Amino acid sequence: MLSLQGMGEAFVLEGSADATVFELYVEQILAPSLPTGHIGILDNLNTHIWAKVRHAIVNIEIP
């Protein structure tokens, strides 16, 4: 995550990331770290537009 305050939560792994890895990142790392009012922007990379990833992003519960 990148914001005006700098770099936020990141996920580093060895090798390539697929939609399953990205989904886990969204659910377990990114979502819990997002403050209310933040806007997410994703490009059209296949891992970003996968249905399970979209579902994970749409259903983020921000505290």
Image (spheres, grey):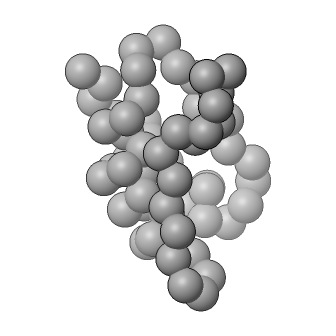
Which sits in the foreground, 50 or 7? Answer: 7
| Residue ID at (48%, 12%) | 37
22 displayed left or right of 46: left
Residue 26 sits above or below residue 59 on the image: below
Residue 31 visible in the displayed image: yes
Q: Position of residue 54 (x, y in %)?
A: 49, 48
| Residue ID at (37%, 62%) | 24
Q: Position of residue 59 (x, y in %)?
A: 34, 36
Residue 16 sits above or below residue 50 on the image: below
- From this viewpoint, which residue is outermost toward the front? 6
Q: How many marks?
A: 0
Which sits in the foreground, 56 or 22? Answer: 22
Which sits in the foreground, 8 or 56? Answer: 8
35 displayed left or right of 32: right
Image quadrant occupied by the C terminus: top left
- From this viewpoint, which residue is outermost toward the right? 44
- From this viewpoint, which residue is outermost toward the bottom? 15
Residue 17 sits above or below residue 54 on the image: below
Residue 55 visible in the displayed image: no
| Residue ID at (37%, 35%) | 33
Image quadrant occupied by the N terminus: top right
36 displayed left or right of 51: left
Residue 50 sits above or below residue 55 on the image: below
- From this viewpoint, which residue is outermost toward the left? 63
| Residue ID at (61%, 56%) | 48
7 displayed left or right of 51: right
